[in-house]
């Protein structure tokens, strides 16, 4: 496969490989799992609701009857849940990739906290930072890859997230966009630190463009939009795509052997299209921002990534 070629409908054989996906019961996370399982991967679906996990697993099995699927309870807003899930994942063995997808897409109108942290930042950022650190050793053992999910909305936001938990000036839009800017900056910072410590793990970021449930095929127990949602979403057809297509850049970032750590993938037309290399928003590429956010995440989660132990695990 040439460097510029990638067919999202014809993935490489993933037999013998194992991937963990957060937020796997709906939307992008579910369809990424479906695509990975169809290519022969062992997939660990994670989510915070056991009934939705069961429904997502059943849906993947209907799509790929021979799929190797397991489920795991994980609430990324709860650091205790993150630690417990990571311990279980480590006990289950091989891990080739980590898709950090779970998140609050529609934040509450008023600032809410969980475990002392702003809800959106805790769910979208802190939980994933902690999970990636907890699973760094098994990833390093396989020379694996982690993919953080960003958003094209970060290119529309002029502010640097100097107050990531929005103690002052909270709005739902700001909470979401700042969390995605932080996610992107951390993904780039993680790759720098992994390289600096000689750890054989790559960190990438991907965004889904403008993907809506109303333009996505129905999946029982997973995607069942109302007639009104389908009508309204189809009015935006020229600038939107399905959640299934939105998962394509995420899956390419996770699998493409030519993808390089520190890079970003997104739809070719920004909001829609086949997956290709994209450019992170300029403000997310600042070294100082990445380092500041890294320190803030370490303080908030009490997780220090075990770079030295991960490097030794891979040797």
Image (spheres, rainbow, N blue to C red):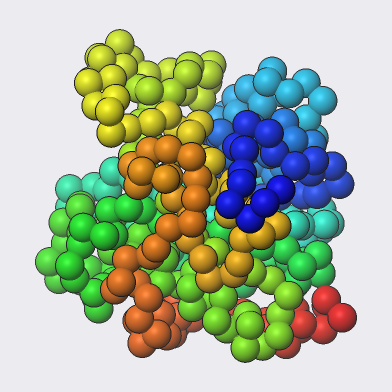
Q: Residue at (47%, 18%) from the top-left corner?
A: 217
Image quadrant assignment for residue 131: bottom right
Which image quarter holds the C terminus? bottom right
Residue 77 visible in the shown view: no
Image quadrant assignment for residue 8: top right
Residue 98 placed where, x, y %? 64, 56
Q: Residue at (49%, 50%) from the top-left corner?
A: 276
Q: Please, is residue 88 above or below residue 14 in the view?
A: below
Name the one closer to the observer, 268 or 214.
268
Name the one closer to the observer, 39 or 60.
39
Name the one closer to the observer, 139 or 35.
35
Residue 38 visible in the shown view: yes
Residue 187 placed where, x, y %? 49, 69
Q: Residue at (73%, 23%) from the top-left corner?
A: 64
Q: Please, is residue 58 above or below residue 191 in the view?
A: above
Q: Please, is residue 273 above or below residue 257 in the view?
A: above
Q: Please, is residue 55 above or below residue 74 in the view?
A: above
Q: Is residue 278 left or right of residue 249?
A: left
Q: Is residue 3 left or right of residue 29?
A: right
Residue 143 placed where, x, y %? 77, 67
């Amino acid at each position: 496969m040439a460097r510029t070629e990638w067919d999202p409908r014809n993935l490489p054989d993933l037999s013998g490989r194992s991937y963990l996906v957060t937020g796997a019961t709906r939307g992008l996370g579910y369809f990424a799992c479906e695509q990975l399982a169809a290519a022969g991967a062992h997939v660990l679906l994670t989510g915070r609701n056991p009934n939705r996990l069961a429904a997502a697993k059943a849906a993947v099995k209907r799509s790929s009857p021979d799929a190797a699927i397991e489920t795991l309870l994980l609430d990324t807003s709860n650091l205790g849940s993150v630690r417990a899930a990571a311990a279980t994942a480590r006990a289950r063995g091989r891990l080739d990739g980590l898709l950090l997808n779970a998140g609050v897409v529609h934040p509450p109108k008023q600032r809410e906290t969980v475990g002392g942290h702003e809800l959106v930042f805790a769910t979208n950022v802190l939980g994933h930072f902690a999970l990636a650190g907890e699973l760094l050793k098994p990833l390093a053992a396989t020379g694996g890859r982690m993919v953080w999910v960003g958003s094209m909305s970060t290119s529309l936001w002029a502010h640097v997230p100097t107050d990531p938990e929005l103690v002052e000036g909270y709005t739902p839009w700001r909470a979401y966009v700042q969390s995605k800017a932080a996610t992107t900056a951390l993904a780039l910072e993680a790759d720098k630190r992994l390289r600096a410590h000689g750890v054989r793990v790559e960190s990438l970021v991907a965004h889904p463009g403008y993907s809506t449930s109303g333009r996505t095929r129905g999946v029982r127990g997973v995607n069942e939009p109302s007639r009104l949602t389908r009508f309204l979403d189809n009015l935006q057809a020229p600038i939107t795509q399905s959640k299934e297509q939105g998962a394509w850049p995420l899956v390419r970032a996770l699998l493409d052997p030519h993808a390089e750590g520190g890079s970003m993938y997104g739809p070719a037309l920004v909001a829609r299209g086949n997956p290709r290399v994209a450019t992170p928003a300029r403000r997310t590429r600042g070294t100082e921002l990445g380092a500041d956010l890294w320190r803030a995440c370490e303080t908030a989660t009490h997780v220090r990534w075990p770079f030295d132990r991960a490097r030794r695990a891979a040797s």
